[in-house]
Image: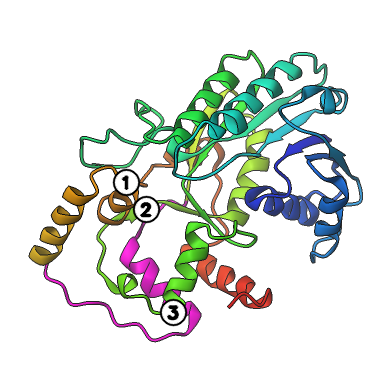
Amino acid sequence: MKVFITGATGFVGRNFLAWLAAHQPETEITCLVRDAAKAQAQWAGQPHQALKNVRWLAGDLLEPDTYAAQLAEAEQVFHIAALVSLKNGPEFYAMNTDTTRNLVQTLGNAKHLQRLVFVSSISAVDRLPTQPAVGPLTEDAVPHPNTDYGKSKRMAEELVISSGLPYSILRPSYIYGAYPRLKSSMDRLIHDVRDRRHYTRFPFPGRASEVYVEDLAEMIWLAGHHPQTGNETFFVSNPQPVRIADVFRDLAEALEVPYQPMDVSPEDRARFQSSLYRQHPENLLLRILFEDYFLCSADKWYHATGYQPRFGYREGLARTVCWYREQGLL
């Protein structure tokens, strides 16, 4: 199998490559990266070195001529590269939408393509900013992305769907695990719980769907090969959501730091929430903390594939903390 991967040096991409090393070591892989020497050196220092057929291709998704010839040989394309943040700015459209447009247009010349797997985001759908989050998002939900990040990913989805190429789109929920981005939400959360920051003891009621990045890596591979995933879009997450307050508690346990939640009545919590919402009406983080904003249903994915996650949420947290310790980051 000849595979072409974008984003192989990022959070999800590195874990996907590690999964391939462990489970598909004979795959012929081309990884599009900005700096081939740096990427090769980065990979050489990792425990998974079973991939013998990796070609590091120096190029730029905004410049199709730098990768068109190699892309034309691919049977499976995994488009993972993205600029990720719950923020706004024109750079999201360049890095997420324009790059996808270039990729699908260039793939029009691919003779052997079996499937393009595009890793999108739950943020491509989001919820109406004027309505409370009620129930999990499903594939039938009307997209209302609230950030330029989410809008750029939704536009990229539409480009993939309308391309005429065989595709599969995954919308992961909250992702965590090894190799996170510096100062990502999980990175900050781990250090804030370790440092016993005051807010980590508040009983936030919001629930979120999550997916451990090693499970996501397997899902990405499965999306490219399962007969029931072709030309379909899926939310992907663990079946059971987690409460934000429980994440604080369980992270403290994994970090082996004392944890004592605040004793806050439901009435006081509601008043505090109302006050924060008035002061910060467009703050998505508040909605994530207080509502089921990042809640989605992955039933369609599980019914189509029969896949069962290998790692529960508590085990995923423990493995994430273990990785931080091994890297000397705690």
Residue 310 on the magenta span: no
Judging by the rendered image, the residue that carries numbered circle 3 is 195
Of residues 210 and 85, the one nearer the viewer is 85
Identify the colour scheme used: rainbow
Residues under labels 2 and 3: Cα distance? 23 Å
Q: Quadrant of residue 202?
A: bottom left
- In primary-sequence order, the first of circles 2 and 3 is 3
Q: Counting other residues with Cα less than 10 Å from the Cα at mark 2, is it few (<14), some (14-19), or many (20 or more)?
A: many
Which residue is outermost to the right?
52
Q: CB of mark 2 within 8 Å of CB of mark 1?
A: yes
Q: Which mark is residue 293?
A: 1
Picture coordinates of residue 191, whole percent (x, y): 49, 72
Which numbered disc, 3 or 1, marks the residue that appears first in the sequence?
3
User: Residue at horizontal 82%, vertical 16%?
Assistant: 111
The residues bearing labels 3 and 1 have C-alpha atoms spaced at a distance of 26 Å
Residue stretch in magenta: 238-265
Q: Quarter-wise, where is residue 201 in the image? A: bottom left
Q: Residue at x 63, y 62 (%)?
A: 178
Checking the image for residue 208, the label placed there is: 2
Judging from the image, what secondary structure is the residue with disc 3 in?
loop
Left or right: 43, with 170 as reference point = right
Q: Residues within 10 Å of mark 1 (few under 14, many from 20)?
A: many
Residue 154: x and y in percent read 48, 27
Mark earlier in primary sequence (2, 1): 2
157 is higher (above) or lower (below) than 178: above
In this rendering, position of residue 298 left or right of residue 81:
left
Q: What residue lies at 71% left-to-right and 52% top-to-bottom?
A: 14
Q: Residue at x 56, y 31 (%)?
A: 169
